[in-house]
Every structure is written in C-alpha cells, then in structure tokens.
Amino acid sequence: MPVLRRGLLPSKLSASKRLPAPVAPTPRRRLRMIRDMAIVTHEPGLLASTREVYSRLPETRYLKPWELQHVLFSLGYCDDLAPEAEIAAAMKEARGDFDPEGAVA
C-alpha cells in the first residue's frame, strides 16, 4: 500500500477529508449578513411610563423629547434610550390626558 504524507493510508485520508454531517440547516452567507429586524416596538410601556412621570413630576410636561428621553432613562423607566420619535408620540398622547388642549398644540 502506498503511504501518503503524514503517514496516512488512502482509506484514512478519504475519511479525514469528509465534512461532518450538518446538524441544522444554516442560512446562506448573504442572508446572515442582514440583521434581523425587531418586530415589537423599542419600549412597549413607553406611554405608561410617560404618563407616570407626568403625574409624579409635573415639571416634566414642559420638556422636549430628548430631555424626557434622558429623564426616563435616568429614573429607570427604560432599560435603554428610547427613540425620540416614539417619545414625542407618547408625549403628545400623554399631554391629552392632563390637558385636552395640550394634545392639539
């Protein structure tokens, strides 16, 4: 029998070059590069948190969205900084609870 490099015989060589059986189907490389999109909103309790902050701290009703974003994060109402657009929508809705004319403005 001919001996190949590293002392392997032909039967051992063919067995060592075989790929292992795939355990689960894997996505193509092109698809793995695309990041999964979140299905739920960033912070589901944002409106409730905004209403609670407005009721406990009335001075926060006059803050801008980026300022309220910091307040919610600093007080522990959010685990991460929520997007300003979502905060602005929650502010508009929550202002209507305390001042019906404020929701229009």
Image (cartoon, rainbow, N blue to C red):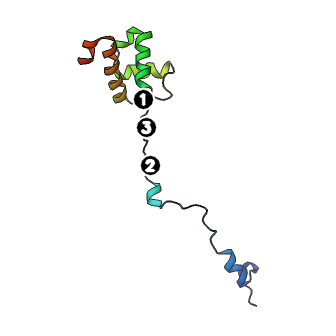
**Residue topped by disc 1:** 82
Inter-mark Cα distance, 1 to 3: 13 Å
The CA span between labels 3 and 2 is 15 Å
Q: Quadrant of the C terminus?
A: top left
Label 1: state its secondary structure. loop
Amino acid on which the number 3 mark rests in the picture = Val
Residue visible at 31% across and 21% down in the picture: 92
Q: Which is more foreground, mark 3 or mark 2?
A: 3
Identity, as a three-letter code, of the amino acid under mark 1: Ala
Q: Check disc 3 and report the residue beneath it.
A: 40
Horizontal side of residue 100 vs 86, given as left or right: left
The type of residue carrying mark 2 is Arg
Give the distance between the C-alpha atoms of the residues marked 2 and 1, in whole angstroms: 19 Å
Circle 3 — which element? loop
In-front residue for pair 21/70: 21
**Viewer-proximal residue, 23 or 67?**
23
Q: Is residue 95 above or below residue 13?
A: above
- Residue 51: where, in percent of width, then height? 40, 17
